Image: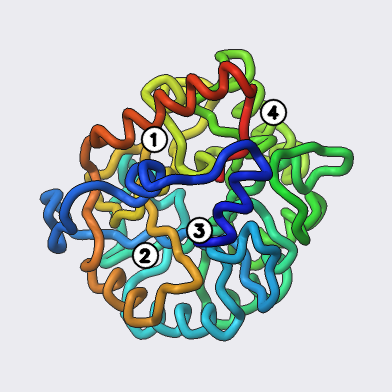
Amino acid sequence: MRTSARTRGERQGGGRGRAERGAQDGEGPISPPGAAGSPAIPVFLYHSVMDDPPDWIAEFTVTPKQFAAHLDAVVRSGRTPITISAIADHLAERAPLPPRPVLLTFDDGFADLPGPTAEALAERGLPATAYLTTGAIAPGGRSLLPPAPMMTLDRAAELERYGMEIGSHTVTHAQLDTLSGKELAYELRSSKAVLEDALGHEVRHLAYPHGYNSPRVRAMSARAGYETATAVRHALSSDRDERYRIARLIVRRTHTVADVEGWLAGAGARVAPYRDGPKTIAWRWYRRARAVVRGPEFAG
């Protein structure tokens, strides 16, 4: 969101600066495939797929034409598409991963998801994982997401019929690593309960809004009953990645098919796991101090 990112941040009390971009997109040099000691696993993070998105989400939106080209690249790659449960089973040593896996994930729950986006995936036989912000899609719900066309909670089961696994993206989309213990427990537990009531089964997976997490957030996510949690990091995951900080590659409108093909080849980004760098830690402390004054803020 180059100009739009500034708009998005200002609406919620502060634009995103260079420090945040460094924190979220990874720090240090790009590593070659397998630099973390394991084969790289691309975990793609999409938001909306539409031609005319609101300004605040425009940078993280791809057009239907772009999306189709990305999916075709996934099919051509010969990688095995999986959902987050396959990674959970591997990291818990319950089952091995298939050869050369790839994971497609979608955050928030925009209106295109249970319609043309799910249909494009199903046409190619591609499963995916959708992380839903319950306050933005449930009747009477409230969230920090700016206005946008969103799906409704009653369509979550429809996503499952298309082959998507459902995970939580919290209630309000707040910066989790700045919240009090009580606020954090609400975000983690209430969103999980709402989705479980709607779907009639356990929801085991979480995505941190904008990737913001900390050791405390990861520990409370585990205690809330989640088996995995995905971050952002703009890095390739691996079969040695951290169960509560799985790295994802955030797809922007400026990324080309060549970028996608590079990630599918296991190149073009760092390979997790790796430790947070000084910029990430400093940015976290700055946001915590700001939240003391302003209260919970939108993670975006």
Q: CA distance from mark 2 to mark 3?
A: 10 Å
Precedes in sequence: disc 3 or disc 4: 3
Of badges 2 and 3, the one in the foreground is 3
Res 202 seen here: no
Q: Left or right of 177: which side holds 109?
A: right
At label 4, the amino acid type is Ser
Q: Give the distance between the C-alpha atoms of the residues marked 3 and 1, in whole angstroms.
A: 16 Å
Check disc 1 and report its element: helix, strand or loop. Answer: loop
Q: Quadrant of residue 120?
A: bottom right
Give the labeled residue for mark 1: 244
Residue drawn at x 56%, y 73% as measured from the top left: 62
Answer whether residue 37 is visible to the viewer in this image: yes
Q: Earlier in the sequence, mark 2 or mark 4?
A: 2
| Amino acid beneath label 1 | Tyr
Q: CA distance from mark 4 to mark 1?
A: 19 Å
Residue 271 bears which disc, if any?
none
SS at mark 2?
A: strand
Q: How many marks?
A: 4
| Residue marked by disc 2 | 102
Disc 3 residue type (three-letter): Thr
Label 1, label 2: how far apart the Cα atoms are: 18 Å
Residue at (66% x, 74% y) in the render: 50
Of the residues under marks 1 and 2, which one precedes in the sequence?
2
Q: Does residue 188 appear to the left or right of 211 in the view shown?
A: right
The numbered disc on residue 105 is 3
Q: Which mark is residue 190?
A: 4
**Does the CB distance between marks 2 and 4 fall below 8 Å?**
no
* Image coordinates for residue 2, horizontal then vertical, percent: 50, 61
Q: Give me the C-alpha separation between circle 3 and circle 4.
A: 21 Å
Identify the secondary structure beneath mark 4.
helix
